[in-house]
Amino acid sequence: MQSSQPVVVQRQRPRGLADAFGMLLIALVAGWLLVAWAIVKRPVLAIPTGVFVGLSVWIGSHDAAGIVIYVVVALGVWRLAHKRSFQRLVGGRSRCWWRRLWVYERRWRSTLVLCGLGKRYRLRESVPRIRRVESSAWRDRVLIRLVAGQCTEDVERVAPELAHSFGAEACRVREHRPGRLWLDFRVRDPLTQVIPAMAVPDTVDLMSVQVGLQEDGEPWRLRVLGTHLLLAGVTESGKSSVLWALLRGLAPAICDGTVVVWALDPKGGMELGPGEALFARFCAEDFEAMADMLDEAVAVMQQRTRRCRKDGVRLHTPTVAEPLILVVIDEVATLTAYQPDRKLRARVEHSIGLLLSQGRGPGVSVLGALQDPRKEVLGNRNLFPTKVALQLDEATQVDMVLGPGARDQGALCDKIPDSLRGVAYVRVEGVREPTRVRSAYVTDQDIRAMAALYAPRAGPGARLAAVMEGRGGDLVMTAEQRREVDEMRAAWRTGGEPS
Ligand SMILES: Nc1ncnc2c1ncn2[C@@H]1O[C@H](COP(=O)(O)OP(=O)(O)OP(=O)(O)O)[C@@H](O)[C@H]1O
Ligand SMILES: [Mg+2]
């Protein structure tokens, strides 16, 4: 059916010259007001502004604007051609300035007063002052100076409010020195994506093995020599993935024999079984044998301690003859709290206690995984210098694992969502604040490949055999390792013996 109503076409009234002129004037005034405000806040901005005004007076505003446009284009080309040097010399600094000026200083005083961080003395209300701002793609770090009468806990208490107010995902407080704190604002989370297994390193630094990423996008590294490591988290939180990521980082040292792994898997070999070839000793079913193995670790430790004392050595240097012994216990509770045999339980607890209290110096480290962090399960959990807390059931468990005050310092393990398996908070001895991290995810296929290629003293021949038989799988290798395997493969094809 056709409508008989006439169609009214609304014509847009052409904007008059006066309108356009008015808009231009408003934009100009607003622009200069913004510049004036920026100069008041950051007087150093007076320099580029002064240069531009000077140029305009000297060669005319038209040419001055032209120069500015050329400079902007040149910077753009630089960024496209060599992003790293641009970021280091220009991009990073401008970002810090911009974030400081626009995000923080613009509403600093009002926000801090509303968050309860203002202190009134007589007629003046003071708030902590910004000393420095550092900014990266993932986080902003704001160094502040506290007002007299304030302490770290005052700021920690309002950290969530600060995060919301400045549009960040989270805010963590770190002590810098007395009276100075860093506020770490997470602006983007680099841990939302699964991190694939890392390339196996060529050489292993036992003081710093990469196992994943930190929330600032930097590598997450764990010390293995001279420490013990506790992993705690509910079932399926990703404890095994941390464990395997660490073993992967240690693979070359396991292969050349400077690290030996004694693995106890009381869950019947489900977790550690696929990598059995990597372990010097492996026990999965017989609890008596597990207790024996722990006793032997204690005996080795005591022997070495005596030798170290005689030689005046405080920290053992692992060698092939005297390697670092890493005792891996996948579910400690099965050997302690859930162990019906009381005598066996007492033996295991005694050995674990001795290893934890004396094993660091002589090179016998313990890596223990726990689902339930209560004291009845592992009374000695405070003896682990490095603690990793993955997803936990209750807020109260966070401090049980990481130590007092950890949750107030932002370790929200009970709030880690199911979608972020492998995300954890780590507290290392000597560092007050926990760090948020995510371990790389080592798949079963990666584990099998690792076991085939890095079994102790496997050597290049065995490595090649594994690759040729397809057991190497899709193992991520460094360029150097890939070249080595390719060379071996070529030699194999031409009938030569692999070296
Ligand atoms: N780092 C990770 N990144 C992504 N997904 C992960 C990661 N770690 C674990 N997962 C996922 O979570 C599942 C359980 O992980 P894992 O076996 O490591 O947990 P767990 O804490 O050892 O569990 P359990 O206590 O039952 O042994 C894995 O099958 C995998 O799908
Ligand atoms: Mg597990």
Image: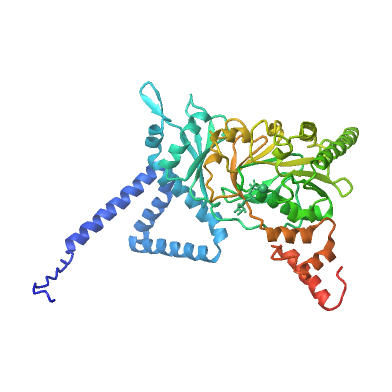
Instruction: State whether residue 426 is above or below residue 496.
Output: above
- Nearer to me, 395 or 161: 395
Q: Position of residue 371 (x, y in %)?
A: 64, 41
- Nearer to me, 187 or 251: 251
Q: Is residue 199 visible?
A: no
Instruction: State whether residue 111 is above or below residue 462.
Output: above
- Nearer to me, 108 or 359: 359
Identify the residue at image location x=80%, y=53%: 254
Q: Dividing the picture into quarters, in which one does residue 196 lie?
A: bottom right
Identify the residue at image location x=59%, y=33%: 399
Q: Position of residue 288 (x, y in %)?
A: 82, 40
In the image, is 12 to the left or to the right of 366? left
Q: Position of residue 168 (x, y in %)?
A: 45, 45
Image quadrant occupied by the N terminus: bottom left
Q: Dividing the picture into quarters, in which one does residue 309 lie?
A: top right
How many numbered callouts?
0
Q: Is residue 104 visible?
A: yes
Image quadrant occupied by the C terminus: bottom right
Identify the residue at image location x=27%, y=51%: 29
Instruction: State whether residue 122 is above or below residue 363.
Output: above
Q: Position of residue 163 (x, y in %)?
A: 45, 41
In the image, is 376 to the left or to the right of 100? right
In the image, is 363 to the left or to the right of 391? right
